[in-house]
Amino acid sequence: MYINWALQQINLKIVYYGPGVSGKTTNLLYIHSKVAPELKGELVSLQTQEDRTIFFDFLQLEVGKIKGKKPKFNLYTVPGQVYYAYSRKVILNGVDGVVFVADSQFDRLEANLETLNDLENNLKQDGHKMDEFPWVIQYNKRDLPNVAPIPYLQLKLNKYNVPYFEAVANKGIGVFETLKAVINLVVANVRKKL
Amino acid sequence: MPKKIDGSKITILSSEQYEAVKKCLGELYSKTKANAVLFADIAGQLIGERGDTSHINTTVLAALAAADFSATAEMAKLVGEEARFKLLFHEGEKNNVYLTNVGDEYFLIIIFQSNVALGMVRVYTKKAVEALDKIIKEGGSSKTVTDIIDDDFGELLANELDSSFKE
């Protein structure tokens, strides 16, 4: 979190993390398509020709002033593929909150677990603790036929009991709910630790 | 300055520090004859800028440059360099971009035309880096995070998010 007192600006960095093709970029695309033009910046995507994120996506959002203060949210995604481990670490620099976008399909459980483990290791290296750090889980692709039931996913992925949301990101279901939750959690966390 | 709360850093730049940063960037801008000079943190958040940035999306530039800078820091580790690389230079046909770190948490971006002498940019940038490092380390804000994020801030923000972000 970076606060510029002179400009009354509060900057937060939120990172969407998760295995390949779980829908991280889709979350940002939906947000970008729905937010009023005066509140959003350009959506930057560093992608391969196959539309896979190679480094990150970036989108800056604002909301109206709050008691004269201007909150700004810098949203990033990380590339999901295993071999982009270093890129993921780089994007986590200075992160304030994380959305873990899990792929709800049964056959992606291993990939979810592997990426979650990778997130935990990276955050630990930066001095964060998973049980105190502000993060939420989004169980995406709930409209697909071969998805695991929520209690099962909760058991496997949510051992820290963080807030979770069901989503169908390409239809916008659960997208804003997830974003609002992580932002509120970041702010609540700051207050809690004082 | 950076205050640690549960591993999360909260950086508060005071008005005095911000003015000092702007002054320093202004001097660097005029001395190097750069097109633009930007100062950002390694999280990719733009802190200050000087010069003609009307046609540049500086928010995005800062985010990209931070990633660029952090990526080369990892590269440095992989090749066995103990400290991070101190500078990055991107050479174009018309424009060059020069990146250099300011302490561990910040960096400068200098955009200048290819006919400007790199040596001059290096010399003045080195001085600016020392000045900025001092401003950041010694400035220290008397404000705390509670001055900004007070009791009802969370609730007001939640309401604002609800009205701005609708499904």
Image (cartoon, rainbow, N blue to C red):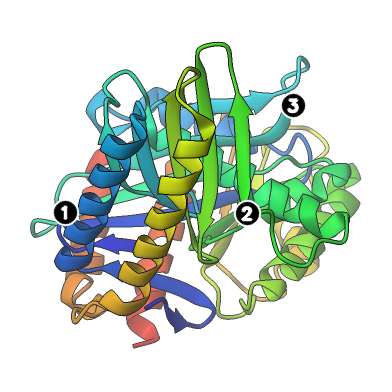
Q: Amino acid at mark 1?
A: Leu
Q: CA distance from mark 3 to mark 2?
A: 31 Å
Question: Which element carries disc 2, helix, strand or loop?
Answer: loop
Labels 3 and 2 positioned on one and the same chain: no
Residue A190 horizontal/vertical position (percent): 37, 76
- Quarter holding the C terminus of chain B is top left
The relative height of residue A34 versus residue A70 in the rendered view (above or below) is above
The residue indicated by pointer 1 is A7
The residue indicated by pointer 2 is B86
Labels 2 and 1 positioned on one and the same chain: no
What residue is at 42 percent from the left and 67 percent from the top? Answer: A185
Chain letter of mark 3 equals A
Residue A137, picture quadrant: bottom right
**Is residue A120 rendered to the left or right of residue A24?**
right
Neighbours of disc 1 within 10 Å: few (<14), some (14-19), many (20+): some
Q: Amino acid at mark 2?
A: Lys
The relative height of residue B76 versus residue B110 in the rendered view (above or below) is below
Residue A150 horizontal/vertical position (percent): 70, 56
Q: Amino acid at mark 3?
A: Arg
- Quarter holding the N terminus of chain B is bottom left
Residue A52 has which mark? 3
Outermost bottom residue? A194
Neighbours of disc 2 within 10 Å: few (<14), some (14-19), many (20+): some
